[in-house]
């Protein structure tokens, strides 16, 4: 991922294809994944989807994919503010998924799993195939298209090198009822087998 330092000392790592911008009150994550390490004594505000994350002395990851945002707190704590709800405090080793319609439960999270992309790993833990395909497309030249929508919720698990997306496709086609049609090196269609 690309490393970025802000004027206040905050450090960021941006995943491939991440869209992040500055706003008057902080940062806006429009899409993709980013890891944030706030500067000592500084507050950081990040907007993602409909949520506003406020952090001081924290390390956390946000993944804005497939219409929802995954928040994982590695160190310290952050507050998540969603419209119409009271703020949620999420502490180290915990995370949740939120969207414009609300937040899921705060759950314990494996820190290694939440930050695997920082070590050039794609790690799936019973992840819906639709989300896995979105991640594969971030690192692959060309596109993988999930043709049959009834395959979206099939679950995939495994750990792969980010630059070996064909390995993910091999696991998908050998462990799930899915076939891959490679039209070119740059276009792969996934269908029900």
Image: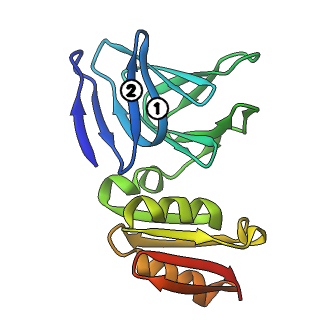
| Label 2 – label 1 distance at C-alpha | 7 Å
In the rendered structure, the answer to whether residue 124 lies left or right of residue 24 reads right
Residue 56 position, x and y percent, is: 40, 18
Looking at the image, is 126 positioned above or below residue 36?
below
**At x 44% / y 82%, what residue is drawn?**
184
Res 78 visible? yes
Residue 108 position, x and y percent, is: 60, 45
- Determine which residue is flagged by label 2: 21
Looking at the image, is 112 positioned above or below residue 93?
below
SS category of the residue bearing label 2: strand
In the rendered structure, the answer to whether residue 19 lies left or right of residue 10 reads right
- Determine which residue is flagged by label 1: 29
SS category of the residue bearing label 1: strand
In the rendered structure, the answer to whether residue 18 lies left or right of residue 181 reads left
Residue 73 position, x and y percent, is: 48, 36
Image coloring type: rainbow
Which of the marked residues, 2 or 1, is nearer the chain's N terminus?
2
Label 1 crowd (10 A; few <14 / some 14-19 / many >=20) = many
In the figure, residue 101 lies in which quadrant?
top right
Quadrant holding the C terminus:
bottom right
Res 128 visible? no
Label 2 crowd (10 A; few <14 / some 14-19 / many >=20) = few
> Please, which residue is most extreme toward the front here?
183
Looking at the image, is 79 positioned above or below residue 144?
above
């Amino acid at each position: 991922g690309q490393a970025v330092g802000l004027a206040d000392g905050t450090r960021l790592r941006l995943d491939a294809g991440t869209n992040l911008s500055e706003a008057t009150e902080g940062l806006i994550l429009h899409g993709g994944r980013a890891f944030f390490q706030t500067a000592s004594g500084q507050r950081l505000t990040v907007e993602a989807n409909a949520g506003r994350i406020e952090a001081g002395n924290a390390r956390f990851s946000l993944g804005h994919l497939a219409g929802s945002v995954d928040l994982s707190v590695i160190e310290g704590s952050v507050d998540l503010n969603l419209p119409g709800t009271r703020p949620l405090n999420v502490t180290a080793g915990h995370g949740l998924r939120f969207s414009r319609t609300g937040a899921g439960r705060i759950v314990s999270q494996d820190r290694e799993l939440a930050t695997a992309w920082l070590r050039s790993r794609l790690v799936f833990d019973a992840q819906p195939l639709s989300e896995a395909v979105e991640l594969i497309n971030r690192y692959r030249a060309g596109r993988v298209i999930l043709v049959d929508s009834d395959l979206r919720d099939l679950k995939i698990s495994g750990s792969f090198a980010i630059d070996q997306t064909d390995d993910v496709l091999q696991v998908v086609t050998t462990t799930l009822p899915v076939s891959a049609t490679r039209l070119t090196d740059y276009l792969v269609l996934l269908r029900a087998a």
